[in-house]
Image (cartoon, helix red, strand yellow):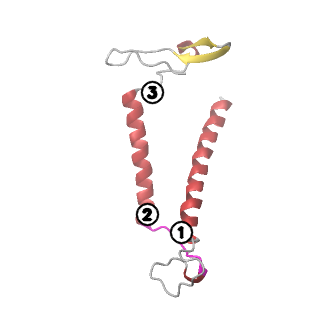
Amino acid sequence: MPELSRIASACGLTVVRGLASMYVIIIGGQAYPMPLFPGKTILESGFYDGVEGAVAAYTPSLPEILLGIGGVAVALLITAVGIRMLQFLPESLADGDTEPRGVGGLGVWTAKAHSTPCGCPNRRMR
């Protein structure tokens, strides 16, 4: 089972890395804006867009944080409903429920097909 914990931690770190990349792109682009008029000096602006090269401070408000959490929750809900309704996952990954098959000399394990409630066989997992 140590392999499962390593896989789970790798998946979690991949998600964290993606969120960190989005933070750097979005917040960095707002804090250090591109010059709109190169070679010109902006004397006054009501948009807090880095007048005279000043770095803008940013702290997300509570509604923005709640919108982000709500967006993630909706995405997880859609994923869970899709997986449940379309039955992408096998019923079991136990050794007795999987069978080896050779593909080009390589052993590939697939889950045995099972019938869905409609009576049609489910796709085999690769």
Please identify the residue farthest to the bottom as the structure is shown. Answer: 43
Q: Amino acid at mark 3?
A: Phe
Residue at image location 45% in from the left, 68% down from the top: 61
The magenta region covers: 53-62
Q: In the rendered image, which quarter is residue 41 located in? A: bottom right
C-alpha span from label 1 to label 3: 40 Å
Which of pointers 1 and 3 indicates the residue nearer the eye? 1
Residue at image location 68% in from the left, 12% down from the top: 105
Of 8 and 124, nearer the camera is 124
Q: Which residue is mark 2?
A: 64
Pointers 3 and 2 in contact (C-beta within 8 Å): no
Reading the chain from its start, which is encountered first: label 2 or label 1? 1
Of 57 and 61, nearer the camera is 57
Residue 88 bears which disc, if any? 3
Q: Secondary structure at mark 2?
A: helix
Magenta-highlighted stretch: main secondary structure? loop
C-alpha span from label 3 to label 2: 33 Å
Q: Amino acid at mark 1?
A: Gln
